[in-house]
Image (cartoon, rainbow, N blue to C red):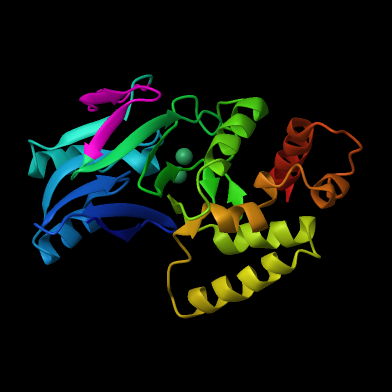
Amino acid sequence: MLFISSIPAFYDNYIWIIENENKHCYIVDPGDAKPVLERLKRDNLHLDAILITHHHRDHTDGLETLLAHFPNSRVYGPSSTDISIINHTLCDGEHFTIYNISFTIHCIPGHTRDHICYYGNEMLFCGDTLFSGGCGRLFEGTPEQMYNSLSLLASFPNETKVFCAHEYTLSNLEFAQTVEPDNTELQLYVKKVNALRKKGENSLPSTIGIEKAINPFLRTHQPSVKRAVNTTTDSDLETFTALRRWKDEF
Ligand code: ZN
Ligand code: FE
C-alpha cells in the first residue's frame, strides 16, 4: 500500500511524497529541499529515492541538499537530461517497482524534450505535461509531440489519479470555460474546485476520467472545441495547436 500526499513548494508547486507503511518514502520533483526536509523530519521518514520528471529547476533544485542529507538515496530521471545528479536513468517503456508496486516509464516530450512520466497501479506522476484543466507550455517540444504525449495519457484508465506538479487548476478552468461555456461537467467541476480552494485545500489529484470530460486540451476531437478555435479542420492536432497558441495569449 502506498500513501501519497503533497508538499507545497514555492507559490504553486506540489512535491509529491510516496510513503510505505514502514516510514520509507520516495519524493517526486523536489524543486526545493527545505519543505521536504521539514516533512521528513516531522513524520520521521527515511528518503529512499527521488523521481524526476524533467530538468526544470522548480523540479530539481532541491536535489543536492536532499542527497547531502540522504547520500544513499537513488535519483531516477530521464536519460536525455543534463542533470548529472541522476544516477538511475530511465528509458521509454522501462518498468521498475516502488515498494512492490510496478510502474512504467513513458517519454512524454512537449513541455521539454526530456519529459517522462511514471505510471503504475492507476497512479500517474506527470510533472508539467498534463495539468488539471490544462497542459504545460511548449518550451522545447513541438505541438505534435505534446499532442501525442497527451493522447497517451488520455488512454490510461479513467480512474487513474493525476498527480501533476502545479496548482494551476482555477486559472486553467477560466480558460476552459471560455473554450466550452456550455460544458456542464466543467461547470460542476469549477464549483467543486472553487470550494476546495476556498478551504485552502489541494485541487489534486484529478483523474484521467475528469480531465477527459473538462480539459479542452484532451477534447480537441470535440466539435465544441473545434468551433471555439474557429477551425473547420478535421485534424485534432491542428485544433490542439490553435488551442495551445490561444492559451499562451489568454
Ligand atoms: Zn517545467
Ligand atoms: Fe514546473
- Left or right for 203, reference 172: left
Residue 45, image x, y percentages? 11, 57
Q: What residue is rendered at 61% in x and 50% in y? A: 134
Q: Position of residue 42 (x, y in %)?
A: 13, 66
Question: 131 or 104: which is nearer to us?
Answer: 104
Q: With 244 as the anchor, is 52 left or right in this view?
A: left
Residue 195 lies, with reference to residue 126, above or below; the image says below
Q: Residue 235 or 56: which is nearer the viewer?
A: 235
Q: Report the quarter where the N terminus lies.
A: bottom left
Question: Which residue is found at the position 21% from the left and 47% from the top?
Answer: 26
Is residue 132 at all visible to an observer of this figure?
Answer: no
Image coords of residue 69 (percent x, y): 9, 44
Displayed quadrant of residue 241: top right
Residue 59 image point, x, y percent: 36, 42
Q: Is residue 53 rendered magenta in the image?
A: no
Furthest toward the top, the residue is 80
- Residue drawn at the location 56% of the way across and 33% of the way down: 149
Count of numbered badges drawn on the protein: 0
Whether residue 22 is visible to the viewer of this picture, yes or no, is: yes
Q: In terms of image quadrants, where is residue 52? A: top left
Is residue 109 shown above or below 187? above
Q: Which residues are magenta?
A: 81-97
What residue appears at the point 30 percent right and 26 percent down from the top-left corner?
Answer: 83
Quadrant of res 49? top left
Q: Main secondary structure of the magenta part?
A: loop
Near-viewer residue (33 or 187): 187
Which of the pair 211/243 is nearer the observer?
211
